[in-house]
Image (spheres, grey):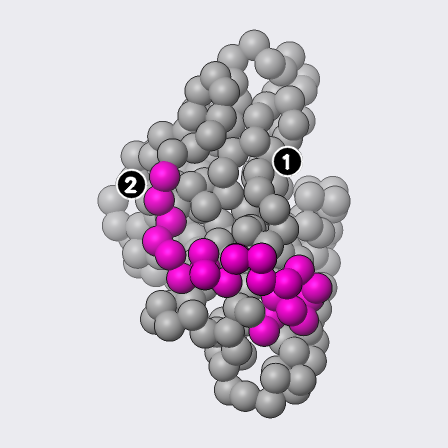
Amino acid sequence: VTRTGLSELDAQVVCRLLLDCSSDGVLDESVYETWCERQLLPAGVLDDDERSTYMRLLSSLYDAFNRDGRGAVDAAEFASGFSVLCAGSKSAKLAAAWELLDDDGDGLLTRRGLWRYLRSFLTILMGACEVATEEGLNTVRVAADEGAIWLSTHIFTQAATNTIAFNFFADWCGVGVWGAGARAREPVTGAVTRSPTKPAPCRRKKSRPQRK
């Protein structure tokens, strides 16, 4: 992640690029793999073995979200979790992910929205540590689901409301606002800060039915 420059990419821009790769809110596996090969594998940095290991990691992260095995994942949820691997402060990444899952743009998340938000981070973090076997990935999926349900229930019990704002969540998890709450309401724009190259949007495939 460090040697390839992934950890130097701006989280907000990478999230937007992943969404640009999606169709009807769904990120196709082959499109994701092509994007990774073109944008996250700078030439001459890794040898063949390292390249293979790195690609397996990136594929494993996708597979952790591929719950029904159809090769189609929720693009917003995946991008939210993927932001953990990118550059930026903890508060900035949390704010960027919050915006992705704020479907109506009012700055608030429902119980389901918060569950998806938390599940995205738990899935990516546990998926990066788990051996990429179907059994292992199923363990990750179940643990992420259950952990996100428990956390969201706990947070909403404290909030005593039907929706919560980012500032409340930021204070709850100990990162404070630090201006991040305002950023969560702003459009995700700008260029990737990476040297010597920067990612570009991938080509999208034709529209496919959204997974229900």
Q: Is residue 205 magenta?
A: no
Q: Residues within 10 Å of mark 1 (few under 14, many from 20)?
A: some
- Please state the extent of the stretch shown in magenta in the rendering: 168-190
Asked which secondary structure carries label 1, the reply is helix
Q: Which residue is more in the foreground, 191 or 36?
A: 191
The mark that comes first in sequence, 1 or 2, is 1
Picture quarter with the C terminus: bottom left
Tell me, for residue 205, which label it has, or none: 2
Q: Please give the name of the residue rendered at 45% of the width and 61% of the height, measured from the top-left corner.
A: 182
Residue 161 visible in rendering: yes
Q: Which residue is more in the foreground, 111 or 192?
A: 192
According to the picture, the residue beneath numbered tag 1 turns out to be: 57
Residue 33 position (above or below residue 170): above
- Is 101 positioned to the left or the right of 176 in the image? left
Q: How far is disc 1 from disc 2 in space, using C-alphas?
A: 23 Å
Query: Percent x, y for residue 151?
Result: 68, 73
Residue 28 visible in rendering: no
Q: Which residue is more in the foreground, 97 or 185?
A: 185
Residue type at mark 1: give it: Leu
Q: Which corner quadrant of the image does residue 205 belong to?
A: top left
Residue type at mark 2: give it: Lys
Query: Percent x, y for residue 167?
Result: 55, 69
